[in-house]
Amino acid sequence: MKASAYRLAGAVMLVASCSVSAQQSGGAAPDISAGKKRAAVCFACHGENGIAKIPATPHLAGQNRSYLEKALLSYRGGQLRQDPTMTAMAKSLSDADITNIAAYFSLLTRMDTGQTAVETLETRERIKPVSTVQYAAETTPATAPASPAMATNQTAAEPRTGDTIFNTYCTACHTTGAAGAPKLGDQAAWMPRINQGKETLYQHALQGIRAMPPKGSCATCSDEEIKITVDYLVAKSRE
Ligand code: HEC
Ligand code: HEC
């Protein structure tokens, strides 16, 4: 597998990579071809085209770039995500590697075969989406030893806010549009949904609808918290 990954690496360079990377870049511009070379070890499982080759492995093609970076940082940090394979893979990546690899996979499109994000939902349900909230805790362990509390705060008596739930559990899809999710603040996408009435929205959020997983895959969310988060989404996405 390694051999084939290396054989393919370099054979097909992303022609458009430079202009796209410049446009997407937040900080230093990522080096897409370096990312692709470094990612050769990942292709055995995630596919050179970002479509996973092994069951229960997430597709990476077209995934949001900063989401990929955060996921890799989380595996490398070992607090927010633990997976024997991915922790080991991520440990050997430098910050620059992570930036470059994330840029590479984010530029690939999910093509062919109907192997779209929908089919990764099973995997999605198992994998906890990374969020900016968690990321902040992960990157500042010295000043934020409170992460165990964060991890177990589903036991708190007070329901969490819509903002908190959204940024932890819903953002992976509803900020990026992954799986065809309507984006937060996208009125055109939300108004017809809002017009269904709140009870219908609650029901769809709680029970799932098409590629929207039940409770957005938040196993620790109470029904009340999901409803609060739907209210938050609606408030941010109307008019
Ligand atoms: C042996 C197979 C294997 C290899 C090699 C591998 N991965 Fe993974 N990867 C997985 C599996 C399985 C998961 C799901 C882990 C989990 O449940 O958290 C995963 C998860 C991920 C995720 C999280 C995706 C998401 O949707 O949250 C990223 C990003 C990722 N891998 C990137 C990489 C990169 C970059 C490399 C190479 C440096 C790599 N992987 C190598 C199997 C692999
Ligand atoms: C794995 C991706 C994913 C996650 C995570 C996710 N959603 Fe969704 N969501 C979707 C998709 C896709 C749709 C559009 C479904 C359709 O209409 O085909 C959707 C639609 C919705 C709708 C509109 C339903 C309707 O009737 O039109 C609501 C409300 C919603 N999501 C709430 C949430 C909340 C709240 C969370 C977090 C707790 C969340 N979602 C997490 C993918 C996701």
Image (cartoon, rainbow, N blue to C red):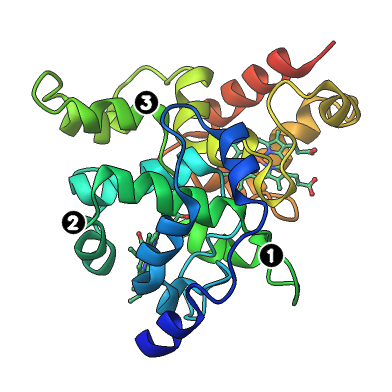
10 Å neighbourhood of mark 1: few (<14), some, or many (≥20)? some
- In this rendering, the answer to whether 47 lies above or below 122 is below
Quadrant position of ligand 1: bottom left
**C-alpha separation, residue under disc 2 versus residue under disc 1:** 29 Å
**C-alpha separation, residue under disc 2 versus residue under disc 3:** 22 Å
Q: Position of residue 155 (x, y in %)?
A: 28, 30
Q: The residue tagged with tag 2: helix, strand or loop?
A: helix
The residue that disc 1 covers is 116
- In this rendering, the answer to whether 90 lies above or below 6 is above
The residue that disc 3 covers is 133
Q: Earlier in the sequence, mark 2 or mark 3?
A: 2
Quarter assignment of residue 79 = top left
What residue lies at 34% left-to-right and 73% top-to-bottom? Answer: 41
Q: The residue tagged with tag 3: helix, strand or loop?
A: helix
Q: Earlier in the sequence, mark 3 or mark 1?
A: 1
Q: The residue tagged with tag 1: helix, strand or loop?
A: loop
The residue that disc 2 covers is 91
- In this rendering, the answer to whether 28 lies above or below 39 is above
10 Å neighbourhood of mark 2: few (<14), some, or many (≥20)? some
Q: Earlier in the sequence, mark 2 or mark 1?
A: 2
